């Protein structure tokens, strides 16, 4: 037997230590116990969507003033919705749960499915909060198994932004296209008007929510990602929409980019599809007149953004006070304050009747487009927002389509993968 | 040869036939050894406890989770045997992920060590302003990966980026680094090397400054060419440093996450820059399959373990020869 030398021992110890460090630290799977805590000191976990930290602080100060004895701590829980979800998952495994947490259109469902969020309906009845004033499409997004698992907060939809100078140069009417086919008819004129090295349109790529915008194209051609839980990527309309995307990419009409709003603001693209939440930034940066329009098609605009959820495993007192905070932040007056500061949409029907909002919309017609589009919105298909990893999966497929791979083959793969995810991760829990 | 130990009872010489004398070192030495062991244990214990609690226990827990279907938000995990492993080895994207990891790792380890050594040799010379240059080379290493990623997003931006501008000056159209998988991998690799070059540079520079001056003088007297001097005098002295760097740079390269997350999120086309560690993140937090993510982490652990053991063996063999 070889003697173990000191160098050998240290080497092996180093190997073991280094290799150990390389492994992901598993977190364990103990069930989260019911957490007590002080119901009068609330933690609100937010990623401050749309750079909203100052306005969130302002609203919290107003809440504390209106509710003496309750203190709210605003916690930076990440730079985007996914990071907030990661932090919340960490807390579920063994940390301290928040009282109120921002949950996005794609993150809330997994928490609800695993019984980690509280259905709010009973709490709202007890607290005499009337849900009928919330915009139906936005509130309805959080419905699962007969309960609503969040209140709409930083909600947005995609919007069609266009450069009025390029539009005018192309001899087009001052409006967005009514259908995607009409846009295709305009595309050559737009390309010529945009000029060399510029594009008629830019879209985000598959890593940056192309799947959200393509939902509109798929619906526009009579397809979609799924009917309830059944994937419909291979439906005729969806494939047709995919072919359309590929055609305009091949023709050099559209360019895919991580941040199309930056190019658009710099005058490098004739139009883009982007969130209503980008309106403030684009209006500030663009040196030309910006036009906004509904997405092409009627009733084909997907909703998006985030809501406010309450963890399931906290005390009833904490839940009641958390609901009080959520309701306050999203009441008519405060949703107006929040949305005017950020570009998101008011989540209360009565908000648009308030004088402050009427005055704001009169001065900002582009913001009014987003609100006028609300009746045209639909909740997104389950395959994108409710299936785990749906957005990333579809985004990858759309990148492949945009780069020239066969649409039918790519979409058949998406169909198969989505069905597998449903069968393996969702079906047994419904 | 007769035993020489004075502690053995010498029966043949008519020594005592009673109970044998205690075997071993004299009492005073024995107490010294015990003290040494106690001191060693005392000094090692805090680190050992930390290693066990924060490294080995999570490691074992991770391996346990890799045999479950744990959804990151679920309170329970069901055992699934080797199903996750079978799936990983059978999936189409596994080859892409392994390929990306291999290319990224080999390029970052090889290039950052080669360039680090070259710069260290250059800046070991008596040059004007060398301290300033040394600081400049090392500075990126202390900047966070996320910040570097954001900065280099602008460098490689297809519309406004520095690279696009520089290439345009010589009449070359810049590739779209964000939409083409090969170029995207090049982009994150370049960025990572830029950020970490200072580390290999500083370690090599320290090693060069601690080398034996008499060997340099001997080589000079013998009329060795610069190449011979480098190959026969410098490199052998730098071997322990090279070994150390090859392990530490390899481990940090395989685990790079921040730059990829900021610049490409593993894309384009879903997995254009997807490495093993990013796949762990994607599966665990995006696809919510923490059990499967643990499987990928375990595979990564095993690969690194094998590679590191091979490195240690090669180093030992080199030293013995």
Image (cartoon, coloured by chain):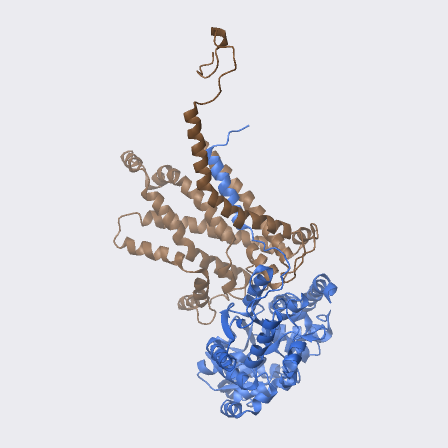
Chain colours: A blue, B brown
Residue sitting at 54 percent across and 82 percent down? A161
In the visual, does A427 lie left or right of A288?
right
Q: Is residue B80 visible?
A: yes
Q: Residue B311, percent across and down?
A: 50, 41
- Vertical order, A19 against B284 (above or below): above
Q: In terms of depth relative to the viewer, which is nearer, B98 or B23?
A: B23
Instruction: Give the quadrant of the C terminus of chain A.
Output: bottom right
Q: In terms of depth relative to the viewer, which is nearer, A216 or A38?
A: A38
Q: Quadrant of residue A200?
A: bottom right
How many numbered discs sit on the rendered protein?
A: 0
- Vertical order, A342 against A318 (above or below): below
Q: Residue B185, percent across and down?
A: 52, 59
Q: Residue A332, percent across and down?
A: 56, 86
Q: Is residue A250 visible?
A: no
Q: Residue A290, percent across and down?
A: 50, 85
- Vertical order, A67 against B232 (above or below): below
Residue sitting at 48 percent across and 6 percent down? B14
Q: In terms of depth relative to the viewer, which is nearer, A56 or A170?
A: A56
Instruction: Give the quadrant of the N terminus of chain A.
Output: top right
Q: In terms of depth relative to the viewer, which is nearer, B98 or A70?
A: A70
In the visual, does B165 lie left or right of A349?
left
In the visual, does A421 lie left or right of B212?
right
């Amino acid at each position: 037997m070889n003697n173990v030398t000191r160098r050998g021992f240290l080497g092996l110890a180093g190997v073991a230590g280094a290799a150990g460090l390389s492994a992901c630290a598993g977190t364990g799977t103990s069930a989260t116990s019911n957490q007590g805590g002080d119901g009068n000191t609330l933690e609100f976990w937010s990623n401050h969507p749309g750079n909203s930290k100052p306005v969130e602080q302002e609203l919290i100060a107003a809440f504390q003033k209106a509710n003496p004895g309750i203190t709210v701590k605003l916690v930076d829980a990440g730079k985007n919705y996914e990071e907030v979800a990661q932090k919340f998952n960490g807390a579920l495994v063994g940390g301290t749960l928040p009282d109120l947490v921002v949950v996005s259109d794609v993150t809330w469902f997994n928490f609800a499915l695993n019984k980690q969020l509280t259905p709010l309906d009973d709490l709202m009845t007890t607290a005499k909060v009337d849900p009928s004033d919330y915009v139906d499409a936005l509130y309805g997004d959080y419905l699962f198994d007969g309960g609503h698992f969040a209140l709409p907060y930083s909600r947005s939809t995609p919007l069609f932004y266009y450069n009025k100078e390029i539009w005018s140069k192309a001899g087009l009417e001052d409006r967005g296209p009514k259908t995607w086919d009409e846009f295709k008819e305009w595309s050559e004129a737009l390309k010529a008007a945009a000029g060399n090295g510029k594009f008629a349109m830019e879209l985000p790529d598959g890593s940056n929510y192309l799947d959200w915008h393509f939902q509109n194209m798929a619906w526009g051609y009579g397809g979609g990602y799924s009917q309830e839980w059944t994937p419909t990527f291979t439906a005729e309309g969806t494939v047709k929409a995919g072919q359309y995307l590929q055609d305009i990419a091949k023709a050099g009409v559209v360019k895919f980019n991580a941040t199309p709003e930056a190019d658009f603001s710099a005058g490098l693209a004739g139009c883009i599809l982007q969130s209503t939440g980008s309106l403030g930034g684009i209006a500030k940066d663009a040196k030309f007149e910006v036009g906004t329009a509904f997405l092409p098609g009627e009733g084909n605009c997907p909703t998006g953004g985030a809501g406010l959820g309450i963890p399931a495993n906290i005390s009833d007192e904490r839940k009641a006070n958390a609901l009080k905070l959520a309701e306050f932040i999203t009441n008519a007056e405060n949703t107006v304050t929040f949305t005017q500061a950020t570009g998101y949409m008011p989540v209360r029907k009565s908000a648009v009747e308030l004088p402050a909002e009427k005055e704001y919309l009169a001065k900002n017609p582009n913001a009014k487009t987003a609100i006028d589009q609300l009746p045209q919105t639909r909740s997104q298909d389950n395959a994108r927002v409710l299936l785990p990893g749906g957005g990333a999966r579809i985004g990858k497929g759309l990148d492949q389509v945009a780069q020239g791979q066969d649409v039918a083959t790519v979409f058949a793969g998406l169909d198969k993968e989505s069905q597998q995810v449903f069968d393996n991760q969702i079906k047994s829990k419904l | 040869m007769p035993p020489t130990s004075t502690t053995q009872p010498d029966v043949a010489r008519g020594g005592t036939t009673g109970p044998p004398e205690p075997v071993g070192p004299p009492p005073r030495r024995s107490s010294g050894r015990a003290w040494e062991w106690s001191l060693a244990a005392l000094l090692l214990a805090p680190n050992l406890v930390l290693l066990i609690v924060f490294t080995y226990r999570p490691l074992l827990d991770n391996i346990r989770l890799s045999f479950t279907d744990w959804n990151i938000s679920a309170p329970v995990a069901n055992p699934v045997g080797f199903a996750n492993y079978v799936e990983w080895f059978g999936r189409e994207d596994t080859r892409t992920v392994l390929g990306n990891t291999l290319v990224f790792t080999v390029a970052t380890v090889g290039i950052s060590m080669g360039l680090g050594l070259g710069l260290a040799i250059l800046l070991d010379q008596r040059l004007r302003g060398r301290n300033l240059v040394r600081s400049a080379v090392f500075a990126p290493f202390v900047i966070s990966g996320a910040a570097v990623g954001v900065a280099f997003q602008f460098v490689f931006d297809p519309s406004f980026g520095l690279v696009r501008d520089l290439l345009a000056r010589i009449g070359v159209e810049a590739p779209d680094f964000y939409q083409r998988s090969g170029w995207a991998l090049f982009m994150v690799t370049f960025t990572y090397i830029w950020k970490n070059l200072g580390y290999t540079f500083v370690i090599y520079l320290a090693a060069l400054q601690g080398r034996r001056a008499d060997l340099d003088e001997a080589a000079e007297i013998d009329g060795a060419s610069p190449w011979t001097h480098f190959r026969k005098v410098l490199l052998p002295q730098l071997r322990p440093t090279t070994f150390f760097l090859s392990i530490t740079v390899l481990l940090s390269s395989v685990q790079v996450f921040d730059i990829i997350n900021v610049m490409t999120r593993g894309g384009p086309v879903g997995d254009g820059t997807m490495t093993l560690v990013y796949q762990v993140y994607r599966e665990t937090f995006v696809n919510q399959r923490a059990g499967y993510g643990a499987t990928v982490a375990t595979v990564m652990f095993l690969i690194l373990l094998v590679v590191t053991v091979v490195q240690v063996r090669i180093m030992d063999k080199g030293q013995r020869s």
